[in-house]
Image: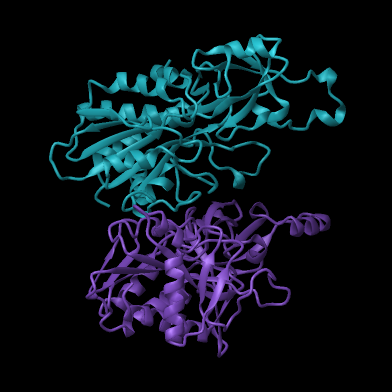
Chain colours: A purple, B cyan
Amino acid sequence: MKELIKKLTEISSPSGREDSIREIIISEIKDHVDEYKVDNLGSVIALKKGTSGKKILFDGHMDEIGLVVTNIDDKGFLRVESVGGVSPYILLGSHLRFENDVTGVVGVESETMKDAGKNIKELNYDLLYVDIGAVNKEDAEKKISVGTFGTYDSRFYDLGKRLVSKAMDDRIACAIMIQAIKEIEKPKDDIYFAFTVQEEVGLVGASVAGFDIKPDMAIALDVTAGPDTPKGFKRMGFKLGGGPTIKIKDMASISASSVVSKLKSVAEKNNIPYQYEILIFGGTNAKGYQTTGAGIPSGTVSIPCRYVHSPHEMVDYDDVLNSVKLLKSVAKEEV
Amino acid sequence: MKFKRLKKLTELYGISGFEEPISEFIENEIKNIVDEYWKDEVGNLIAHKKGKKSNRGRLMLLAHMDEVGLMVKKINKDGTLAITNIGGVDPRVVMGKKVKIGEELKDGIIGYKAIHEQKREELLKTPKYDKLCVYAGHEKEDDAKSEFNVGDPIFFDTQYKEIGNYAIGKAFDDRNGCEVLIKIIEYLQENPVDYDVFFAWVVQEEVGLRGSGVAASQIEPDAAIVFEGTTAGDNPELAESRWAAKIGQGPVLTYAHRGLVPDRKIFDVIKEAAKKHNIPHQFKGRTAGGTDAARLARTLRGIPAGVISTSARYIHSPMCVMSLNDFNNTIKLGQTLITEGKVLSK
């Protein structure tokens, strides 16, 4: 499964520019599902048919955080703004890859030594620029235009039990869903797999993906913070390697208690390690389903992840495998 | 005067939640040149121009009728009116301005301490809304209460004028979009198309994109174009790289904004149409701020939309400046896209 994770995470495909990741996902699943479609906004929705007459939906977002070029100056330097949450501190000094495979590095303005200190302290996007190696505006405009999207340019690293990549958020969920699609045979319920767009700019795809399906239950798969680092968030108790988490709440939604108890009982019955998660910030696509139509009972299964929204997000491989197992076990039962 | 109806539209008073004078005016302008129209429960005005052929798709064009402004929050002991903002209004831009209060449009002013009364340190500080109030001719709480109520809307009071190639006035965000839609209906009278075109003048955009989703649910369009008024931000003290847009450089096209990356194919269709027909255009240099396109994407099965704006300096204030050339080009781009019909067949 590591090969699949590498393939999915090394693609550069930020919110609103999901074309290349969509292509890969479709090619991975098309021979293993009963049907699939691309919806109005670009989300891929696949179905594995069951027999119970009930419907369950799994969601993983296929976009990743990124950047967009807003200006090209006379010397050929670019200005960018974030697509989703990208900290200027983490951006500074990083290597970027844009559409058409143009790459660049990020620098910070400073005219004096005093500036240099002050600008680092008060870093913001107005002070950052991207250097794509162009010698002037004309040269830059040959390579890139305003409105071009990009992402961090970093590789997938296999550290054994731990895996690192720029886009574990949320390609790890895409990988888990693809793996489950390949391994699930004869599910009880109709199982819908929604690979949704534009989660990072505000849960866009998931706000409409369930509109026609009206599933009996929706479960978002996403990464969550890994707080078990030096002086990590002490108000949260889960950790990498402790198993997928069953979310109780975050800032966007409170999981339906029916979803929480279902996941808990399935995990316990199948000896799958799990942890409860209360996240004191952030939100997931579960909110999109909860507020669709007359409301869909929704919850979230998270994969603990360190350094979220950085070029190097880290997850635990056992958590990933246990998440696949959890999905497969859910598929064996009726909602 | 090049745009007489735009003058009327921008001079009408209609903050979020009080859009009726605008919808009444637009209704009168369009009622004889559309196939059907209706007002919905929340106050949106929706019109329909049927296509020459059926089943060729449904395109929705959208602009919001509301403007930013203020509201009476409390009637003070001294007969003045305490205020709060409706939509994003910087307190600095309302100081020393004339306003109209309530639906009867009574006169008032927002004063502030004279320069003589301010200490040096105070001079450049921005007062919060709790330090500002409207004086409307009363010295006592009871007198003011006989004329005003908490919740009365307060409107900027600015006349529209054209100075050379520029217009000055209020509510360019988004009465200029409202006018673009009317111009497109008039254009369709002479240049009909095969597919159905729906027009939605929506309420309460400025307080959180509240009208557009409801309008779209009634129309069920296949795609949409949002016509907006947007920030210019071409202030000379800022580096050009920080400008959102520059007035006079043409309609502004949006590749990304708050809460949505607008549909790429529609964005490309708009960009290519502008290029092909030599319509000057520019790209929004800032991704802050959203439009009703963000709501449309979250409505029904997800409605893909493009965003075309006319930029104005000092928007969300009583005094804005925009280029009439830009406005003309926005209308031209809109009409071109309607005739091409590619936004639907993307």
Which quarter of the figure is the N terminus of chain B placed in?
A: top left
Position of A207 compared to B91: left or right?
left
**Frontmost residue, A83 versus A197:** A197
Asked whether the viewer can see residue B245, the reply is yes
> In this picture, is B164 found above or below B204?
above
Question: For residue B138, which quarter of the picture?
Answer: top right
**Frontmost residue, A76 versus A200:** A200
Q: Which residue lies furthest to the left in this view?
A: B53
Residue placed at 21% from the left, 38% from the top? Answer: B196
Residue placed at 52% from the left, 63% from the top? Answer: A65
**Frontmost residue, A156 versus A172:** A172
Q: Position of residue A119 (x, y in %)?
A: 75, 56
Q: Position of residue B32 (x, y in %)?
A: 22, 20
Count of numbered tags: 0
Q: Which residue lies furthest to the bottom in this view?
A: A160
**Frontmost residue, A129 versus B216:** B216
Asked whether the viewer can see residue A3, the reply is no
Residue placed at 31% from the left, 63% from the top? Answer: A215
Q: Position of residue B87 (x, y in %)?
A: 55, 34
Question: For residue A112, which quarter of the picture?
Answer: bottom right
> In this picture, is A59 found above or below B45?
below
> In this picture, is A114 found above or below A133?
above
Question: For residue A80, which quarter of the picture?
Answer: bottom right
Q: Where is residue B337 in the image (x, y as percent from the top left)?
A: 30, 40
Position of A177 compared to B259: left or right?
left
